[in-house]
Amino acid sequence: MSSDASPTIGFLCGSLREGSINKTLEKALTKRFKRAGAKTTSINLATYDLPLFHGDLDMPPGVKKLSRKLRSCDGIVIISPEYNGGLPPVLKNAIDWTSTDDTTHFSQRYWAISSCTPGPMSGIMCMRQINYILMRLGAHVSPIQVGVGLASAAFDDKGELIAEPSASLADKMVADMLAHV
Ligand SMILES: Cc1cc2nc3c(=O)[nH]c(=O)nc-3n(C[C@H](O)[C@H](O)[C@H](O)COP(=O)(O)O)c2cc1C
């Protein structure tokens, strides 16, 4: 945990899109963590130098920078779109690159997973894949996942997550993370 009593929770969004519904979910979860007393930080993958990984590339400086940023957090929440039943390449690329450096930002941190979709299925397939990958990397992963389907009706005009059961799950996720970091 950070030197003062408040843990820092990092948010890693798998969508870089302006107007992303997953960014809306990130903001709603951020508010909930702040209300519970946590410090929060948004980790914007667009600001890290992360070319598409392949084994002949030298590690770009963005990899260590991202690993350090993740290690500076006590817990990390992934908020991810679902692409064709899986996780988006921008997120997989970041996970793969940083796993070639050092995996303590996975194995020594508490992680949680969430997803937002326009349709009703709430990203359950991509959350399952992300969970598997994080566990392969030794991460402690919260059993509480926040899937938000039918996004256009899930938030109020202040950006609060209001749809059930997602809103109750978000409260449970906050409590579970803060109990583990
Ligand atoms: C290549 C691609 C594949 C997609 N596959 C799925 C899918 O499997 N399941 C789903 O619920 N939505 C799928 N969608 C729709 C996304 O959930 C939707 O575009 C969403 O708004 C993306 O998240 P964002 O708004 O945070 O960028 C897909 C979108 C794209 C571009």
Image (cartoon, helix red, strand yellow):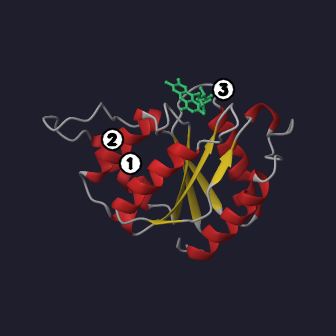
Amino acid type, mark 2? Gly
Q: Position of residue 151 (x, y in %)?
A: 73, 35
Q: Is residue 60 left or right of residue 155?
A: left
Mark nearer the N terminus (3 vs 1): 3
Task: Give the residue at the far left of this rendering.
Answer: 56
Crowding at dot 2, Cα within 10 Å, few <14 / some 14-19 / many 20+, comes out as: some
Q: Which residue does the image show at 57% across and 75% down from the upper left? A: 180
Q: Secondary structure at mark 1?
A: helix
Name the residue at 31% across, 49% down: 98
Report the amino acid beneath label 3: Gly
Q: Name the residue nearer the viewer: 143 or 93.
A: 143
**Quadrant position of residue 116:** top right
Label disc, if present, on residue 62 of the rendered structure: 2
Q: CA distance from mark 2 to mark 3?
A: 25 Å
Please provide percent x and percent y for residue 4: 59, 74
Instruction: Report if residue 124 is visible in the image.
Output: yes
Q: CA distance from mark 3 to mark 1?
A: 24 Å
Q: Indicate which label's residue lies in the foreground, 2 or 3.
A: 3
| Horizontal and vertical percent position of residue 108 | 40, 69
Q: Is mark 3 within 8 Å of ligand 1?
A: yes
Determine which residue is flagged by label 1.
66
Q: Quadrant of residue 172?
A: bottom right
Instruction: Quickly name the residue at label 3.
Output: 19
* Marks 2,3: beta carbons within 8 A: no
